[in-house]
Amino acid sequence: MKNLNLHNFFNIKWFAILSILVYLEINIQIQAQYISNNGAYITISDDTAVTINILENDTDATLLNKGTLNVSVLQNNGNTVGNGIYNITGDFTSTGTFFSASGNVYMNGTSAQKMDLGTATFYNLIINNTASVTLNSTQTMVTNMLTINATKKFKIEAAKSLTVTGTISNLGGTNGLILISNSSGMASLIHNTQNVPATVQRYISGAPEAYQFLSAPVSNQNISGSWNPIGTYGNGTGYDLYIYNEPTPCWTYQLNLTAMPTWAAIHPTLSFVKGKGYLYATQAPNPTKEFIGLLNNGNISYPITNESPDLTVKGFNFIGNPYAATIDWSAPTGWTRSDLLLATGGYNMWIWNPTANNYGVYNSNGGTGTNGVNQYIAPTQGFFIRAQNNGSIAMSNAIKVQTMGNTWLKEKNNSTKSSKTSHLKIKISSNEGYGSDEVLLQFGFPQNEAGALKLSSPNTDAPSVYFNYIDQDLSVRYLTDILENSRIPLQFKPGIVGKNREYSLQIDHAHAQDHLLLLEDKKMKIITDLKIRPTYEFKASEGDSEDRFVLHFQEITDSSLDVPVRVFYDGTKINIDLSFFDGPADIQVFDLLGRLLTSRKNAIATLHRLSVQQKQTVYIVAVSQNGKTHRKKVLVH
């Protein structure tokens, strides 16, 4: 049956007749050079072996294999099912569906093979090729056994993924299973088998010397060799490697032998620590590093502290994704985070974005993040969390997911809508390439809450935008609605790269409520309707007042520009909000008898909190500026 092709004759597909003959024969062996089963239904029966050079299973066709199929090239564009044996010596391409509930698929080539697959489910997949078999798929699953024989090699392509719900038997060692990484991202592997030897690559993206957040997906990779390249730095190296110590708080360099805390004092092991975050940069452009060892798997716990004397960074711990798969910060199960600081029913995590030159933040209970951060944390990605007390964070295989999140953080569109709230993002970018920063307002909460603390960029050239609220700088605020919060002050700090640098302010209001949105530039005395003109261009210099912008959700009148002071009691202290004032003002607090109890001269335009001794009484707050005095009564209970 050489050069057999199918034809329709009186609407009868001849290969359908052939399939019946194949089904009836026992122990028959059929050989052909090329078969194209256009629209046919083919059955290879039990105890039947078919040897074919090239088999094309077309879009409307179905191949049911109950016997043995020996094929050089298998191109499945339709449905290939059955529990038979497949011996494949060439490439396996499938744009259709491949399903084997209890059969064996052998990749038996002697030269490099590719598996370019759509939806594919294997029972047993056996890699028997010394040259290599490369999987290029995001929808492939092995339900019983993935076997990589001794001296054989199986690769998962960059930005692709594999799920093994059964067992992995890698007899090829760390050279037998390779997860590829390049500029498009990382390979991802979900599995449940302990101590699987593998090589996990990590492409170092960005410009030379740009810092990356890293974490090791294997348990026994020594921090030496290619991880410590030589270069032209003063100490002869061509890399930087740091860890973060929360109690100090500080970054500690790997070669620091004298200044406390030394590397050895807080990192006594020679290998990467499971679950720990690392800050890494190389002098060489875009090298590909390798984590070689046994894949981390199962339950993993990492200790965290809340001891820093610096309240602005107290509780911040630098950890990392310990698995060779993407993990979901919003996974419903698999996380133990009771020792983390709770924020609006969720937990915040921060990731460094090297393109923005700033940190982004995402809350596990939210629907969107800032600066490109979302709920998915790529393999080998480090990130910050915030502890509320000393303890630990724990995770299990339940947080692993196969998603497009297996790319490390880069600048990207991240406008996922929260199902619970509406939101507004404000992004300010340097027009000269020094980075960008982003803040987030989320509405629909029962009361106003602080949100996520801002982690300041270590790059002093990068712009910084934030909300100042109760003596905290925030990247995210949680608010009730725009009626209660009709004006929101927005602080901005330009980089130190010079005077009159150019910046752009943009908003993401695709999912915001249908309301007025005005931007007030207090320095330039300009009002811009951001719904009509969503980009506002401006210039700024180091030393400018950071209280430059105000967001308005209602019409601005002359009386609203001359804003009265906002005074309220938060259960602990009297709060005097001067955010809308231009320049300093004087604050005085009196009792009902007119006695002066406390005062502040030249108070800057921000939120001030004052303590009073007596409760269950009314105080009078007076704020004076430029000959005008605003007086407010406040009940302290």
Image (spheres, rainbow, N blue to C red):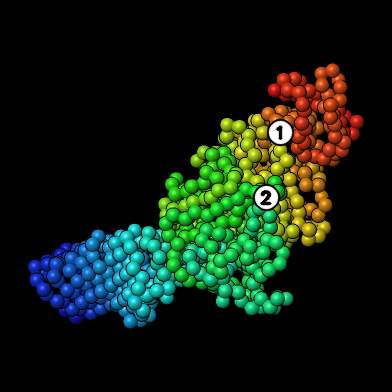
Front residue of this view, candidates 45 and 556: 45
The picture quadrant where one finds residue 121 is bottom left
Query: Is 460 positioned to the left or the right of 356 in the image?
Result: right
Give the residue number, with chain letter if any, for mark 2.
Answer: 308
The percent position of residue 609, horizontal first and vertical second, equals 76, 34
Q: Is residue 533 visible?
A: no
Q: Quadrant of residue 154?
A: bottom left
Residue 133 locus on image (x, y percent):
37, 74
x and y percent of residue 173 in the render? 40, 74
- Mark 1 is surrounded, within 10 Å at the Cα level, by few (under 14), some (14 to 19) or many (20 or more) other residues, namely few
Kind of residue at disc 1: Glu
Is 85 on the left or on the right of 170, as rendered? Answer: left
Q: Which residue is drawn at the image coordinates 20% and 77% (left, top)?
A: 51
Q: Residue at x 67, y 45 (%)?
A: 474
Q: Which mark is residue 497?
A: none
Q: Amino acid at mark 2?
A: Ser
Identify the residue shown where x is 47% and y is 58%. Answer: 326
> Along the line of sight, which residue is nearer the eye, 253 or 84?
253
Q: Nearer the viewer, residue 47 or 531?
A: 47
Quadrant housing residue 463? bottom right
Q: In this rendering, is residue 196 above or below 448?
A: below
CA gap, disc 2 to disc 1? 44 Å
Q: Secondary structure at mark 2?
A: loop
Q: Which residue is mark 1?
A: 555
Residue 428, image x, y percentages: 69, 52
554 left or right of 217 in image: right
